[in-house]
Image (tube, rainbow, N blue to C red):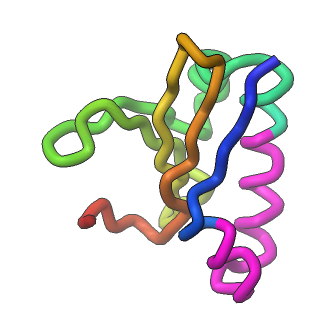
Amino acid sequence: MWVLLESREVVRAIARHAIPKHILKEYEAWKNIVVTSSPSALRGFSGLRDHALQGEWAGHRASYLSAQWRVIYRVDANAVEVAVVRVSAHDYKR
C-alpha cells in the first residue's frame, strides 16, 4: 500500500472549497487508485492521461481530472510515498 501526502497548498484549497465538488470527486477516485494499487496503475486509465512533466516540473507527473483540472504529483518509490503537489486548473507555473 502507498502513502499519499498532500501539500499544504492542496489541503488549503480543499478546505477553502477552491476546488469544485465534481473535481474533488475525481480527485478522491484518483487517490483511491494510487493508495490501493500504485501510481503506475494510473497509466491503465486512459482518461487520466497520466504523463511525466518536463522543464521546471521535471521529476513530477500529472494526471487529468477533467479537461481543465490536473493533479501534479511526484513518486518516492524508496519510501513508498506519493506527494501531491497541486490540484489546479491547467497551469504548471510555479
Q: Horizontally, is 91 left or right of 19 in the view?
A: left
Residue 11 coordinates in the image, percent (x, y)? 68, 68
Q: Is the residue 42 above or below the residue 83 in the image?
A: above
Question: In the depicted view, which residue is nearer to us: 62 or 76?
Answer: 76
Residue at 54%, 70% in the rendered image: 9
* Residue 55 position by quadrant: top left
Question: In the depicted view, which residue is nearer to us: 92 or 50?
Answer: 92
Residue 70 coordinates in the image, percent (x, y)? 51, 56
* Residue 12 position by quadrant: bottom right
Residue at the limit of the structure toward the front, as seen here: 79
* Residue 34 position by quadrant: top right
Residue 74 among magenta residues: no
Residue at the limit of the structure toward the left, as seen here: 55
Question: In the depicted view, which residue is nearer to us: 18 or 49?
Answer: 18
| Range of magenta residues | 11-31
Q: Quadrant of the C terminus?
A: bottom left
Q: Horizontally, is 45 left or right of 35 in the view?
A: left
Residue 1 coordinates in the image, percent (x, y)? 82, 17
Residue 27 among magenta residues: yes
Q: Is the residue 48 above or below the residue 14 in the image?
A: above
Question: What secondary structure is the magenta-colored segment mainly?
Answer: helix
Residue 7 coordinates in the image, percent (x, y)? 57, 57
Residue at 64%, 53% in the rendered image: 6
Residue at 47%, 35% in the rendered image: 74
Q: Horizontally, is 79 left or right of 90 in the view?
A: right
Question: In the depicted view, which residue is nearer to us: 73 or 69?
Answer: 73
Q: Is the residue 18 above or below the residue 29 in the image?
A: below
Count of marks placed on residues: 0
